[in-house]
Image (tube, rainbow, N blue to C red):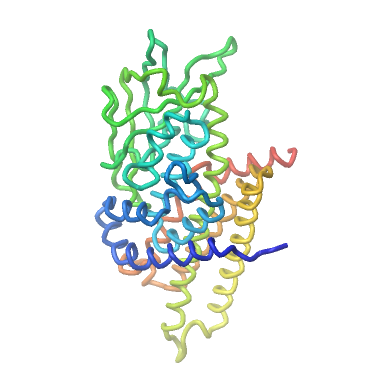
Amino acid sequence: MDFELTDDQKMIRETVREFAEKKIKPFAHELDEKEEFSEEITKAMGDLGIFGIVVPEEYGGQGLDYTSYIIAVEELARVDGSHAATIAAGVSLGIAPLLYFGTEEQKKKYLPALVAGEKLFAFGLTEPGAGSDSRGSKTKAEKVGDEWVINGAKIFITNGSADMNWGSIVQTVTDRDDKGVPEFTCFIVEKGAEGFTQKTMHKKMMWRASNTAELYFTNVKVANSAMLGTKGAGSKQMLKTLDSGRLSIGAMGLGCAQGAYELALAYAKQREQFGKPISRHQVISFKLADMAVKIEHARTFLYKACWLRDTGKPFAKESAMAKLYCSEVAKEVADEAVQIHGGYGLMKEFDVERFYRDQRLLQIGEGTSEIQRLVISRAIGC
């Protein structure tokens, strides 16, 4: 077994880490405090090529493996969860469905600008009454003549109302069988469509510098050419999108844990109690050792899941495992990092406080920890 990263993967880690340290870290606290989405930093991430790592060169991307993309998300999350979320949602939920299921015309129209970081696309799945139970969606699309008319609402949609948002891929109910089982179809709805309203959500606990939106559809008309793939394929599209998307959330958990651990280690080395740095007290050194072990285990398994995907092997079970484990490691490591900081860890002047808040969504977004356990239990035959 070869655990060595390729030269391209090492270069991506070094490049994205340097970018995050120089271009994001100095502004992360201020943007978090102001709940401000940075279009400037987002476009800079586009200039760096992060949005296009897995996209073929013919659409403006780099055509690299998924592991390279995951490493980039990890390195962003090591510094700031908000900007990692912008990339993770922009690629895994915005670009990926178009790349996987779009027509050639749709790919050529949308992908180059999305890959360049000039525009963003969102994925409209979650609804006020349909979270873990995604099949409980109420947003409908009805065929009227040569058009489809969409009515409904979505919530908690990352990148959904940023100024640079171009539109959303929206899952709708287009039919039901005799037993009432819904048929799902996805449509591309562009910003500015009549009856389409995008509303930014504020007062979030976490990812305060990322854009989160509510989307409302009131008799929104789209052409048949706006359909993503074929009628009735929405559920399969959603599941495939989420299988890969879970890996990016796993990367966010891994990066968050790494960043919180590094903050705790640095603090423990300079903070003195009872005449010596607290890192030399066994109770603290053992905490740090346990944190390091968990992070290495999380990284090894996440990269294995990515390897399965890159080599064309089944990875749905492993992606759920990686998402579950990495997000819960982030919770445990961030909690211990705050404990090591003591009272200072509760103050906004210390970055570890932001890491503690940012990790909390990782056990909820893209399938809760409970849903991941359900996916895993079914995969193992329970």
Name the foreground residue: 243 vs 224.
224
Count of marks placed on residues: 0
Name the foreground residue: 115 vs 377.
115
| Res 209 seen here | no
In the image, residue 352 sits, relative to residue 72, either above or below, namely below
In the image, residue 210 sits, relative to residue 4, either above or below, namely above
| Res 178 seen here | yes
Residue 225: which quarter of the image? Answer: top left
Give the quadrant of the C terminus.
top right
Q: Position of residue 307 (x, y in %)?
A: 64, 53
For this orientation, the residue located farthest to the right is 381
In the image, residue 381 sits, relative to residue 19, either above or below, namely above
For this orientation, the residue located farthest to the front is 58
Left or right, residue 66 beside residue 382: left
Which residue corresponds to the image point at 46% horizontal and 86% vertical from the top-left?
Answer: 277
Which residue corresponds to the image point at 56% horizontal and 73% vertical from the top-left?
Answer: 287
Q: Position of residue 61 (x, y in %)?
A: 45, 47
Residue 272: which quarter of the image? Answer: bottom left
Name the foreground residue: 209 vs 51.
51
Name the foreground residue: 221 vs 36.
221
For this orientation, the residue located farthest to the top is 145
Q: Position of residue 297 (x, y in %)?
A: 63, 63
